[in-house]
Amino acid sequence: MEQKELKVSAIKNGTVIDHIPAQNLFKVISLLGLANIDNQVTFGTNLESHKLGRKAIIKVADKFFADDEINKIALVAPQAKLNIIKNYEVVEKKTVTVPDEINGIVKCFNPKCVTNHQPIATKFALVSRDPLALKCHYCEKVTTEKQMVIL
Ligand code: CTP
Ligand code: ZN
C-alpha cells in the first residue's frame, strides 16, 4: 500500500472532517461551535486537494456529531466527508446534506427583506438541493445557488 504522510496527526477516537474548502474553514469552525468546546481540535488548511484545489481538514477528538448538527456545514462545505474514527480505524464515512430548514448562514437575496434591515437572523426553507434554492421565511423570495451569499 502507498505510504501516506499525514499533515495533521491521526486521532484515536473522534471525527475527521475532510474536504472543506480552505476559504470556509473558519465558517465551519464557527457553525460547529468548535471555539467553545473542551475537546482537542486540530486542523490544517491550504492542503493540496485534487478535487478542491486547496482544502482544509478538522479533527475533533472524542466527538461524534449528530446528523442535524453536522448538516449545518453543507452550505459552506458541500463536499465535506466525515470520517468516524474508533481506536485509530475509520469505521464509517458520511457525507453532508443540506437540511430542510436553514437558520442563519445565508443572506436573503431580496434587498427589501426585513433581515437585510433589522437585526433578525435569516431563516429559509429548502426548495431544491441541486441546484440549491432557498425560500425566505420572512419575504418568501427564493435565493438561488448563484445568488447565494454566506453571512
Ligand atoms: N484519519 C485520522 N486518524 C485516524 C485515521 C484516519 O486522522 N486514526 C484521517 C486521515 O488522515 C484522513 C481521513 O481520516 O484524512 C480519512 O482516512 P482514510 O479513509 O484512511 O483516508 P483516505 O482513504 O485518504 O480517505 P478519502 O479518500 O475517503 O478522503
Ligand atoms: Zn427574505
Image (spheres, rainbow, N blue to C red):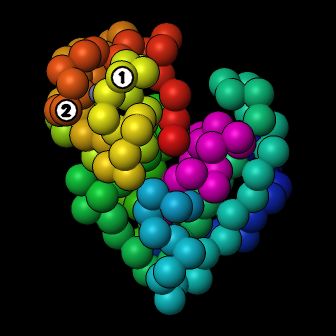
Residue 26 included in the magenta stretch of the image: yes
Secondary structure under the numbered disc 2 in the rendered image? loop
Horizontal side of 92 relative to 15 (left or right) equals left
Residue occupied by mark 2: 138
Residue 27 included in the magenta stretch of the image: yes
* Earlier-in-chain disc, 1 versus 2: 1
Number of numbered discs visible in the structure rendering? 2
Q: Amino acid at mark 2?
A: Tyr
Residue 132 can be seen, yes or no: no
Q: How much space separates mark 1 and mark 2, taking CA atoms?
A: 11 Å
Residue 19 can be seen, yes or no: yes
Whether the residue under disc 1 has CB within 8 Å of ligand 2:
no
Q: Is residue 139 above or below residue 5?
A: above
Q: Position of residue 53 (x, y in %)?
A: 76, 27
At 38% from the left edge and 28% from the top edge, which residue is drawn?
108
Q: Position of residue 111 (x, y in %)?
A: 42, 21
Q: Position of residue 78 (x, y in %)?
A: 46, 32
Whether the residue under disc 2 has CB within 8 Å of ligand 2:
yes
At 32% from the left edge and 27% from the top edge, which residue is drawn?
113
Q: Nearer the viewer, residue 126 or 56?
A: 126
User: Which quadrant: the N terminus?
Assistant: top right
Q: In the rendered structure, which segment of residues is drawn in magenta?
A: 15-28
Horizontal side of 147 relative to 137 (left or right) equals right
To which quarter of the image does residue 54 belong?
top right
Horizontal side of 86 relative to 54 (left or right) equals left
Ligand 2 - quadrant of the structure image: top left
Q: Amino acid at mark 1?
A: Lys
To which quarter of the image does residue 140 belong?
top left
At 64% from the left edge and 37% from the top edge, which residue is drawn?
21
Residue occupied by mark 1: 112
Secondary structure under the numbered disc 1 in the rendered image? loop
Count neighbours of disc 1 (C-alpha within 10 A) and say few if under 14, some if 14 to 19, many if 20 or more. Answer: few
